[in-house]
Amino acid sequence: MPERVTASFIPKESLMQDRVKRPSGPSAFAFLNVVGIVIIILTAVSAGGIFLFKSYTEQSIASKKVTLDRQRAAFEPATIEDLQRLDARIQTARALLSRHHALSLVFDELEARTGGAVRFRSFSFEPAGQGAFVIDMSGSARSFNSVAIQSESFGDSAVIRDPMFSNLNLDTAGNVVFDFSATIDPSRIPFGLLIEPRTQSAPQPGAGESAPSEPFI
């Protein structure tokens, strides 16, 4: 007797297993929504921070500008302009004075360095090129030793350069007569020294020779 085959259209596996294996569409969509909301919030916070920082910066600049204007007004701009003009005039005057020479400083140097046993009778002063000046003098001294001491004194001078005694002879009274020439350094006799205080750095001449009790004639 043939076997009987029974056909059944009911699935043998459980329908619950199909539900578990089916991808969850609503969960993925919710995750994307959360990420989008977070991004929007961060963007809004950043925009707000930038706006607040910009407002603070503008207020700080305005406040500092007001403070600067107050401090500038306290210094009296008109007084500052007057002082600037005065400073410009002083600088111009100094520049003009630096181009002029004071001949009186040469006489001061000669007076300070001439010993009591030496006497000058003539004086000439003329330019020698490159801003320098040449002086020529004639004079007399009590002795040859006086002339040597005087030469050493002039040699120590910062104003008198290249001092030279020449034509030494004895006159009828026994005094030594001579001619003298030297170069004057123009940088040492600026006119500005007559205005600014000066200190005498030159030693008194004739330190090794006692001055005569009577004037040398």
Image (spheres, rainbow, N blue to C red):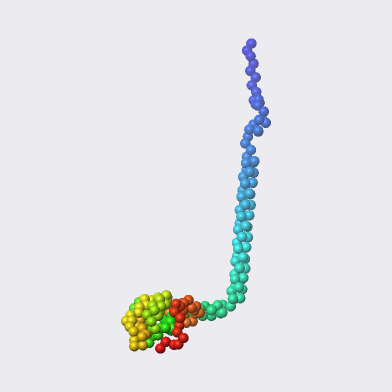
Q: Position of residue 86 (x, y in %)?
A: 51, 80
Along the line of sight, the residue nearer the viewer: 32 or 160: 160
Q: Position of residue 203 (x, y in %)?
A: 46, 77
**Residue 99 shows in this picture:** no
Along the line of sight, the residue nearer the viewer: 27 or 87: 87
Q: Is residue 63 left or right of residue 189?
A: right
Q: Position of residue 214 (x, y in %)?
A: 45, 87
Residue located at (44% from left, 83% from top): 116
Q: Position of residue 38 (x, y in %)?
A: 63, 49
| Residue furthest to the top | 1
- Count of marks overlaid on the render: 0
**Residue 164 shows in this picture:** yes
Along the line of sight, the residue nearer the viewer: 119 or 84: 119
The N terminus lies in quadrant: top right
Along the line of sight, the residue nearer the viewer: 53 or 68: 68
Residue located at (61% from left, 53% from top): 43
Above or below for 33 versus 106: above
Q: Is residue 168 left or right of residue 93?
A: left
Q: Is residue 196 left or right of residue 47?
A: left
Above or below for 15 versus 153: above
The C terminus lies in quadrant: bottom left
Residue located at (64% from left, 21% from top): 7
Residue located at (40% from left, 80% from top): 146
Above or below for 215 versus 8: below
